[in-house]
Image (cartoon, rainbow, N blue to C red):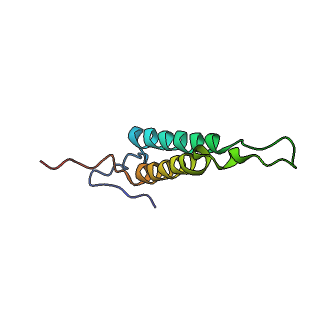
Amino acid sequence: MSKKNNNGQKPAKEFVFQKKNYLFLFIGIAFIALGFILMSGGGSDDPEVFNPEIYNFRRIRLAPTLILIGLGIQVYAILLNPHKKKKE
């Protein structure tokens, strides 16, 4: 059964997420993608030769930090309520 309001009309359907939510979702995806891009590479062409480049700052600290920031932005974007009225 469909619910009707006082006037006998069906309520207007609207999306849960608004433009602001999607903006933050795409920003979070960009942070996560950048983190994975920065984490890639550092291998060696010869498997017998060790390449210490795998343990540099970019791959060990910066990239995982960007991924965690991106995940935090994603959680914020999901929990953001664009319909909330500001209290004055």
Estimate the x, y position of residue 25 in percent, counting from the top left.
48, 44
Lateral position of residue 54 relative to residue 25, left or right = right
Which residue is found at the position 46% from the left and 61% from the top?
1
For this rendering, which residue is in front, 31 or 22?
A: 31
Estimate the x, y position of residue 22 in percent, counting from the top left.
46, 41
- Residue 79 position (above or below residue 19): below
Which picture quadrant has residue 32? top right
Lateral position of residue 50 relative to residue 74, left or right = right
- Residue 38 position (above or below residue 68): above
The furthest residue to the bottom: 1
Disc count in the image?
0
For this rendering, which residue is in front, 15 or 78?
A: 78
Estimate the x, y position of residue 61 in percent, counting from the top left.
55, 50
Lateral position of residue 86 relative to residue 55, left or right = left
Which residue is found at the position 35% from the left and 55% from the top?
4
The furthest residue to the left: 88
Estimate the x, y position of residue 76 in percent, counting from the top left.
41, 52
